[in-house]
Image (cartoon, helix red, strand yellow):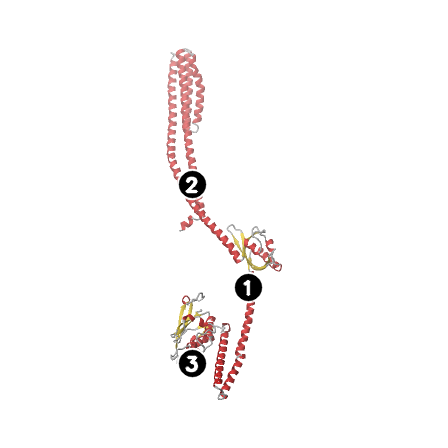
Amino acid sequence: MKFKSLYNSERFLKIIFGLSLFIVLVMGGLAYRYIKELSDSFDEVQEAYQLHIELEKLLSALKDAESGKRGYIISKDSTFLEPLWVSGSELDLSLQRLKALTQGNPDQEEKIADLEIKIDNSLRIFEKTLQLAQKNEIESAEFISAFKEGRQNMNSVRFKVLEITTHESDLLGTKKERSSKSLSNAPMVVYYVLIFSLLILLLIYLQISKNLKILKEKNELLETFKESTTQSEIISKHGNWIWNIDDNTFEYSDNLYRLLGEEPQSFEPTLENFIAFTHPEDLDKLTEQVNKMMENEDLPFIHYRIIQKSGSIKHFKAYGKVLIDSDGHKKLLGTTADITDEIENYRLIEERNLELERNNKELASFNYVASHDLQEPLRKIQTFISRLEDKEQENLTDNGKLYIKRIKSSSARMRSLIDDLLQFSRTNKSEEAFEDSNINILLETAKHDLVEIISDTRARISSDSIPSMKVIPFQIKQLFSNLISNSLKYRRENVAPVISIRYSETHASEVPNLKYSKHSRYHTITIKDNGIGFDQEYAEQIFTLFSRLHNKNEYSGTGIGLSICKKIVENHNGYITAEGYPNQGSTFIVYLPITS
């Protein structure tokens, strides 16, 4: 994996490419060396051949001179002496060439010098015998002695020439053997080096081709990303800009021009042209921020307004951060967003908050009226009806007694409705503080408040031990009270109520219909009874305010109790569900988050 990463790296490719160039240069050097050796070998052969020729010329000139001398001695014809006079100059030229050809070779230079002495002796003997022949002293002892000496000297010249040519041939053979051995490996070495270089270049080509393909794909992705970024800028109403700090130039994205109400790239992207759109009231503030940006090379969040040519005023928010690229160049990358809609929404929220505050005050006034002004005349109605029933009972007709009975029932229902509404409006967690509470005590308190109806119905209530929780105590007591009251109220006729309260812990993923939660686990409290139950299709409806599944003549109630339960649970960031089966009972499950 590490080698593969190295192989794909740009540095590795550069190293391999440099190595390939080095090998090619070495191969070129080797080729040059072998060619130079061939050239040198050719020159040496040429010189050896030239040396042989000059020696042959020299030896031929000496032979011609001796033949001419003999012809003259026999015939006394002077024309035979012409080769002798010509050979002298030829011998001098040949000796000069031989010295030049053997220069730098001490052995051969010594042999040439020795040869030159022998040739001079031959020429001297030629001249001596020629003089004696011209004097007709051919039969003299001196001539015979000189003639024999000339023949011996001529043989020594031949031997010396042979010695020189043999030595040169030996040298040429040694050089040829060394050169042949070196040159015999040259084609193979050059071939292998060439193959190796081609393989490396092929690998580089394949990797470069792969990199080009990847680069093409990345360029396509960049084009897609650029188009996506452009669309994102348009949708999110923001534009990007770049301040090149080193050369103090700016670059604006197309959508930044659109935010200003202009066509993309319709003016030069300079700071002066951009500031020209600034709202006069924000001009000094923006100028000060820009000067700080130039000085500190940083731009924190700033807010300002601009005026488009159409006259529309827009609210902008800008932010910038410095980025240093691989070449050490500093750039401040900035983004500018159109937050006009946010400002308008904030203003709308403020207006709605004010409206909500007024509604809360009106609700507080309603609570006061419900708890005092409405209940006061209701109490008087109930008081006068009670007096009328006590003192005028005998004077009332049957219809009158019926009317009074109905008035008493309606006023009692009216009083219960006002009390429940007041209780519902007061179920607000902001009015109560969360505190660590013993849930078992709160449950017993709720049962104590209902002791009379529990006793009258001969109800049996069993419960598990519930751990302490951080709750609003009053509301949790109210929750237990309302749920137990609901089970007692909707009991089956001639069947004693049996209510069981169980506790467990539940993971958030197991809570039904819970779409999102910041808590992982929940306290689970289950209240189950054996009452009349309900059809499951009404499981959500029963928690709706004023919702009733039964006629008020069948079962008393205002349809607010379970709505209060739901509001209390939601105040605790919990969740409540219900399950029912007609004539079998109901089950209410309360989920309260486990907080640390």
Marks 2 and 3 close (CB-CB < 8 Å): no
Q: Which residue is mark 3?
A: 453
x%, y% of residue 593?
44, 69
x%, y% of residue 224?
48, 52
Up-down: is 503 above or below 227?
below
Looking at this view, name the residue that lies furthest to the right: 280
Marks 1 and 2 close (CB-CB < 8 Å): no
- What amino acid is labelled 3 in the image? Ile
Q: Which residue is mark 1?
A: 345
Identify the mark at residue 332; answer none if there is no mark: none
For label 1, count other residues whose C-alpha is less than 10 Å away and answer few (under 14), some (14-19) or many (20+): few
Q: Which residue is mark 2?
A: 23
Query: What element does badge 1 sit on?
Result: helix
Q: Residue at x 50, y 54 (%)?
A: 228
Q: CA distance from mark 3 to mark 1?
A: 53 Å
Instruction: Work out whether residue 397 or residue 313 is closer to the camera in this orientation and state it.
Output: 397
Up-down: is 589 above or below 150?
below
Circle 1 or circle 2, nearest the eye: 1
Query: What element does badge 3 sit on?
Result: helix
